[in-house]
């Protein structure tokens, strides 16, 4: 009986992976460079003194038509030297400006409040957001903006993470795996999630959605905004797999930081649609079956487990190849173990208590 359950779970997981992988590989038309709209890059930074300089330096190298790009750095009431570093770097650089957000108004909190303040003063037709621990390539803004055909309201991009150790490598694989799932669902017109460190949307779509002031607060504000834009049914939300738009972020330093990141994402994911829960359930059941393998003493269960691992390996490796990244088996092994553990533990952590700590604040 358990072998039938295991076979069913792995079969569903395989079908889901093929469908979502096909969605992630979908191609989209681009507009010509001379048609690129004006753009505003927004970075919200809170206590990022050890990371913000690399981000600023990469943004300074951004390739975009002259006079069409502004970069707004929000010093989100940092208590370290973040503000000083920002001010020193942008001095004499007219495409940069910095603001300090006003105090919390209504339901606007944390990063959401910082972004809302920046959006009020932004001048670009397209808003691009990233984080202070990220370093975009010079092609990032141009590549993302080139996907804004007239009916496109939001464009999401992929993010990897730097670092050579298995601990850092497993985080990079986790990011790319989750991006691919999110890309597959979005490109099949069923968006489930996104990561705001590589996100862009029309300023008009944001305004049509009512702005963050009128969108229900979420600790994952990027996902909430994407979902709201999609539900208006006025714009398309697309998630192209494009190495020219690949963001690189710094990995988290320890498991404590990972715990709070995953819990934050898990709390934000509670508002998922039914199809989002179905995707999570498929992976969850497959991983439970893998965890039970030592107790089954069954060759069939062993073969199915090996097949499931092969599916994950092939799936992730194809994405790495498409993005021009080096795939390491040691990193994949660490990721596979890490993935099983946190997927199984996340509901246990999130459901009883939805308190989240992030950037020195509690939500």
Image: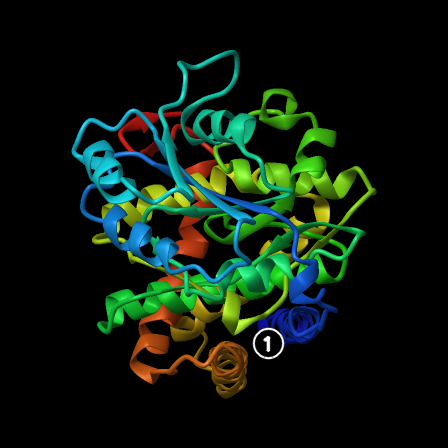
Rendered location of residue 8, percent (x, y): 67, 72
Identify which residue is drawn at 83% across, 42% down: 234
Image: 358 above or below 257: above
Rendered location of residue 114, percent (x, y): 43, 28
Rendered location of residue 176, percent (x, y): 47, 66
Q: Which residue is mark 1?
A: 3
Identify which residue is drawn at 44% across, 54% down: 344
Using the image as rendered, state which of residue 325 and residue 89 is in the foreground.
89
Using the image as rendered, state which of residue 304 and residue 80 is in the foreground.
80
Where is residue 81, by image quadrant? top left
Identify which residue is drawn at 37% across, 45% down: 261
141 lies left or right of 264: right
199 lies left or right of 76: right
Q: Quadrant of the C terminus?
A: top left
345 lies left or right of 27: left
Rendered location of residue 179, percent (x, y): 53, 61
Using the image as rendered, state which of residue 255 and residue 189 is in the foreground.
189
Tag 1 secondary structure: helix
């Amino acid at each position: 009986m358990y072998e039938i359950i295991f076979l069913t779970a792995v079969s569903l997981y395989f079908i889901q992976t093929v469908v979502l992988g096909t969605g992630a590989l979908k191609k989209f038309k681009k507009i010509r460079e001379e048609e690129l709209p004006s753009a505003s890059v927004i970075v919200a930074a809170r206590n990022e003194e050890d990371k913000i300089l690399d981000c600023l330096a990469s943004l300074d190298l951004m390739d975009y038509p002259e006079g069409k790009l502004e970069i707004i750095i929000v010093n989100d009431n940092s208590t370290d030297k973040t503000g000083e570093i920002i001010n020193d770097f942008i001095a004499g650089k007219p495409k940069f400006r910095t603001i300090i957000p006003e105090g919390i108004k209504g339901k606007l909190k944390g990063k959401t409040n910082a972004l809302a303040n920046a959006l009020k003063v932004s001048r670009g037709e397209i808003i691009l957001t990233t984080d202070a621990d990220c370093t975009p390539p010079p092609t990032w803004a141009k590549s993302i903006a080139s996907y804004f055909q007239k009916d496109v309201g939001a464009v999401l991009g992929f993010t990897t993470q730097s670092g050579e150790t298995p601990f850092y490598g497993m985080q990079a694989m986790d990011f790319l795996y989750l991006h691919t799932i999110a890309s597959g669902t979005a490109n099949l017109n069923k968006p489930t999630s996104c990561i705001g460190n590589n996100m862009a949307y029309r300023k008009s779509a944001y305004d049509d959605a009512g702005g963050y002031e009128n969108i229900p607060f979420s600790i994952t504000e990027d996902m909430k905004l994407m979902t709201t834009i999609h539900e208006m049914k006025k714009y398309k939300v697309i998630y192209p797999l494009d190495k020219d738009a690949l963001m690189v972020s710094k990995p988290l330093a320890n498991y404590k930081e990972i715990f709070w990141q995953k819990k934050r994402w898990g709390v934000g994911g509670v508002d998922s649609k039914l199809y989002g829960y179905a995707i999570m359930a498929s992976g969850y059941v497959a991983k439970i079956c893998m965890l039970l393998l030592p107790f089954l003493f069954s060759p069939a269960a062993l073969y199915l487990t090996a097949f499931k691992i092969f599916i994950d390996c092939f799936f992730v490796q194809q994405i790495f190849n498409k993005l021009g990244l080096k795939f390491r088996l040691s990193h994949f092994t660490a990721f596979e173990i890490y993935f099983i553990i946190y997927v199984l533990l996340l509901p246990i952590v999130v459901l009883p208590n939805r308190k989240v700590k992030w950037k020195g604040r509690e939500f």
